[in-house]
Amino acid sequence: MSRYYEHPETALIHGGISTDERTGAVNVPIYQTSTYQQDGLGKMRGYEYSRTGNPTREALEKLIAELEGGLAGFAFGSGMAAITAVLSLLKSGDRVLISSNVYGGTFRVLDKVFDHFGITYTIADTADLAKYKSQITADVKAVIIESPANPLMTVTDIAAVAEISHRHGLLVIVDNTFMTPYLQKPLSLGADIVVHSATKYLGGHSDVVAGLAVVNSGELAQKLAFIQNSTGGVLGPFDSFLLIRGIKTLAVRMDRHVENAQKAAEFLKHHPAVKTVYYPGLPDAQGYEINRRQAKNGGVMISFELHEGYDIRRFFEHLHLIMLAESLGGVESLVCHPATMTHASIPAEIRRQIGITDGLIRLSTGIENIADILADLSQAITSAKQ
Ligand SMILES: *Cc1c(COP(=O)(O)O)cnc(C)c1O
């Protein structure tokens, strides 16, 4: 089908399979079915069983492939199911490099599950290219990058890491959850595979758990389709519908999210009680120039620390509007405490080495009126003073 648009905002609404050809319904129906009638032996109408293929899920898979500029997309029951499927491309004896601030669950699945199958990992410094190069040993077959990485918002030069990695035959995997294709397109920077926790900004309303993967080659598409069907962690039709619905408003949500995040980061930066602020949209942030080159802006996620004499327990307890919760990317502002929540599965010693202190607070700025968000932060910081 020819496309009559050029811009990402339009692709979010009209990309993939956006209408129902049979009825003209402007939304793809929820095909809540597990199986499909066959017209005769071996005569299928394109679908045979919903683990293998479902029209609602397929609409979502085509949409995310188009948005990321890839060849094929795959939808899973969670971000971790997507990451697990992608890691299943590896074999016993293979080693994976993971950027030091990788999502806690990605670390855990490698450390505690894939180790059963003889797949090992090394925590690599993808933000330091010379150091990164020295960590590529003969058994390394893949690298997982997050940029900005959770929770210190460390920026990695995706194109540079992809170039070095490809010289050694590595598979380059980018977890693009924090940025979404609206702000950053890793495949265009040289990545082979993009993964998402679509639970976050793509869904956008904290009402669905889902994962996506997009590949840039026919060979990878075939392999991942085989793994998706064999291991079976697929996304259901209703959740696929919710995700398509969420993605339609991604541009307007992200524009407001980022505008609010930039203001919240500047507010925190100038607050006398705040010791450090990590946000790639601040000109003195680590990797600011690299991020500006490879992404539309600094994204939404901010981490910060309060000075000595401020009790973070009291800070969390005194927030009225901003909720203390795991996750991020919904329309509502959320805070979390990485050391005991999102990154608790990383041993304390490794946490300290990579800079995740016990005082670190992570903020997912929502799309509420920024004045209300800043007022809540301000009064909770005041209440936290000992
Ligand atoms: C949440 C998250 C995941 C895991 O996704 P789930 O949908 O919770 O399984 C992976 N990577 C990042 C960066 C995340 O924030």
Image (spheres, rainbow, N blue to C red):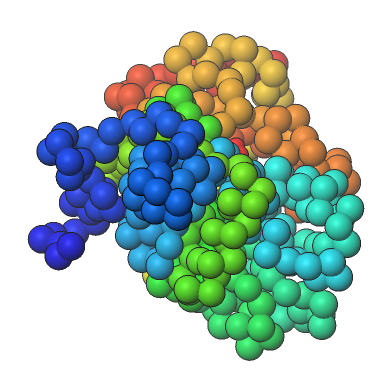
Residue 297 vs 186, above or below: the answer is above
Query: Could you say which is closer to the camera, residue 139 or residue 285?
Result: 139
Q: Quadrant of ligand 1?
A: top right
Residue at 46% across / 46% down in the picture? 48
* Closer-to-camera residue (39/302): 39
Q: Does 112 appear above or below 253?
A: below
Instruction: List the single residue furthest toward the front.
Output: 40
Expressed as whole percent of the image width and height from the top left, the position of residue 326 reads 60, 28
Write the residue at 76% across / 79% down. 136
Q: Is residue 249 visible?
A: no
Relative side of 251 to 242, left or right? left
Residue 105 visible in the current orientation: yes
Please give the count of numbered marks on the rendered protein: 0
Foreground residue among 234 and 381: 234
Q: Along the line of sight, which residue is nearer the eye, 28 or 317?
A: 28
Q: Residue at x 49, y 43 (%)?
A: 49
User: In the picture, which quadrant includes the C terminus?
Assistant: top right
Q: Residue at x 41, y 24 (%)?
A: 332
Answer above or below: position of 324 versus 136.
Answer: above
Which quarter of the rendering shows the N terminus? bottom left
Position in image of residue 302 (x %, y %): 51, 41
Q: Position of residue 72 (x, y in %)?
A: 43, 62
From the viewer's perspective, tell me whether residue 70 is left or right of residue 339: left
